[in-house]
Image (cartoon, grey):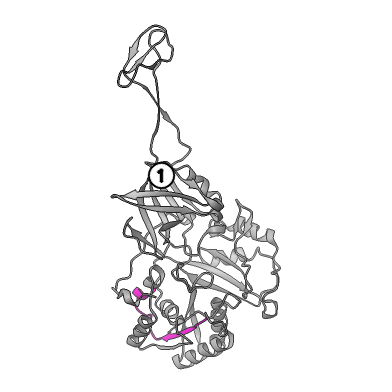
């Protein structure tokens, strides 16, 4: 069976992945055989999310009624139900739910009624708390079907330490990255000297190591020196896969979705208030603004090198009329020509204009020429993919060390726009 849970945390604390790690242990203690633990990242643009918009799914073998009772009991025990924005959902199903719902929850928006209809049709056991919004993520997690997958090892703090400063040897995190990169990534941002894998919120997470397999994240974890964790869990996840990206066309983009969009640079990038850099790209007579925000740091220096005529592919979420860049591909670097009067072929002096449409004339010897001198200016920009630094990277964004972006399948099933939250 699969157990899906979502929306048990709040900005003040708790973490749905922690609840999943605890549940996996309680299921094992009750005689269940736990076969899989999934950390499922959903659409990062959902306004109701807390932090990374993660749901969890546990695959196990045993009695479904007992599993449902254990899961609901743990939500009652650990979820931050006092928070108005926390609305948990629990789903237990004897088979994976339709994968289209998972993809829609990652790439688009789902409605509560839509999730309940799916659960009813599938014969799943489910419980929604308060306004039942967590049933969307819980159903999506139980439906997860990764086209690509990575691993994350999460270490959790002892409950008595939640909300206190975390004690971690900073240098050990840099050593872990150095020893295991590129098989693990985003533990630290070496270029900007920033630790990435340690949260600053009062939740149970001590640190998280992301990588290509359970073996590699476990190897990296061995280098980390910290306070003693209470428990640790390795999850299979869709993080670092670009599962949220869908192909898009300028003029047809929808708010809150994340796209790969091709176009031609239409304007010189401008640095605005706060250090944010913006420029326009166009295609088939339509234009859209692209944004590289201040937290992307050195990535903005690449963006500033773009010039009108460059052909690019922009990857990022479409919000407020802009594509918020996660990465960008420069496909064609437009040539830049400098045009100036030619040198005189007789005396070698630089000619001057003889008037509009009259070519050029040498003031020293009187020689004439109709053609200017054209010089190709070498650009500091090369074709290729460029990405934001680890400290600004979204959970779902695929690091370039894993390869360039690849668009995954869209949801296979149509839906009624009125169902969208």
| Foreground pick, 115 / 31 | 115
Helix, strand or loop status at disc 1: loop
Q: Is residue 225 left or right of residue 341?
A: right
Q: Is residue 141 visible?
A: yes
Q: Residues within 10 Å of mark 1 (few under 14, many from 20)?
A: some
Looking at the picture, does residue 399 appear above or below residue 131? Answer: above
Vertical relation: 129 (above or below) 403? below
Residue found 43% across the figure and 15% down from its top: 350
Q: Give residue 409's quadrant in the image.
A: bottom left
- Whether residue 38 is visible here, answered yes or no, is no
Residue 405 in picture, x, y percent from top left: 41, 56
- Can you identify the residue that label 1 sits on? 267
| Of the pair 101 and 368, the residue shown nearer to us | 368
- Magenta region includes residue 95: yes
Percent position of residue 106, x then y: 41, 70
Highlighted range, magenta: 86-102
- In this image, 419 relative to 185: left or right? left
Which corner quadrant holds the N terminus?
A: bottom left
Give the left or right position of residue 415, taking residue 50 as reference.
left
Residue 171 position, x and y percent, is 69, 58
Q: Quadrant of the C terminus?
A: bottom left
């Amino acid at each position: 069976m699969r157990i899906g849970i979502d929306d048990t945390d709040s900005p003040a604390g708790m973490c749905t992945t922690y609840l999943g790690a605890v549940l996996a242990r309680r299921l094992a203690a009750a005689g269940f055989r736990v076969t899989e633990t999934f950390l499922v990242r959903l659409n990062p643009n959902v306004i109701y999310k807390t932090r990374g918009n993660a749901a969890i799914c546990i695959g196990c073998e045993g009695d479904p009624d007992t599993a449902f009772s254990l899961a609901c009991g743990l939500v009652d025990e650990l979820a931050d139900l006092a928070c108005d924005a926390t609305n948990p959902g629990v789903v237990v199903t004897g088979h994976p739910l339709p994968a289209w719902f998972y993809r829609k929850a990652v790439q688009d928006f789902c409605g509560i009624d839509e999730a309940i209809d799916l659960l009813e049709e599938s014969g799943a056991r489910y419980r929604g708390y308060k306004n039942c919004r967590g049933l969307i993520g819980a159903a999506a997690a139980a439906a997860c079907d990764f086209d690509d997958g990575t691993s994350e090892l999460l270490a959790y703090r002892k409950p008595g330490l939640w909300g206190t400063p975390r004690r971690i040897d900073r240098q050990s995190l840099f050593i872990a990255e150095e020893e295991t990169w590129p098989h693990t990534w985003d533990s630290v941002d070496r270029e900007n000297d920033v630790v990435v894998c340690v949260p600053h919120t009062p939740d149970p997470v001590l640190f998280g190591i992301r990588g290509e397999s359970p073996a590699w994240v476990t190897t990296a974890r061995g280098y980390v020196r910290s306070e003693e964790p209470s428990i640790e869990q390795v999850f299979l996840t869709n993080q670092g896969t670009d599962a949220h990206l869908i192909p898009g066309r300028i003029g047809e983009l929808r708010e809150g979705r994340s796209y790969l969009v091709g176009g031609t640079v239409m304007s010189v990038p401008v640095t605005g208030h706060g250090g944010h850099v913006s420029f326009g790209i166009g295609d088939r007579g339509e234009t859209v603004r692209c944004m590289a925000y201040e937290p992307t740091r050195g990535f903005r220096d690449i963006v500033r090198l773009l010039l009108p005529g460059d052909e690019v592919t922009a990857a990022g979420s479409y919000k407020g009329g802009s594509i918020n860049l996660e990465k960008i591909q420069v496909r064609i670097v437009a040539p830049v020509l400098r045009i100036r009067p030619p040198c005189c072929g007789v005396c070698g002096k630089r000619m001057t204009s003889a008037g509009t449409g009259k070519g050029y004339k040498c003031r020293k010897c009187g020689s004439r020429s109709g053609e200017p001198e054209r010089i190709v200016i070498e650009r500091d920009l090369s074709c290729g993919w460029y990405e934001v630094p680890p400290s600004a990277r979204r959970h779902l964004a695929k690091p370039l060390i894993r390869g360039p972006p690849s668009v995954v399948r869209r949801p296979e099933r149509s839906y009624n726009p009125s169902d969208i939250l």
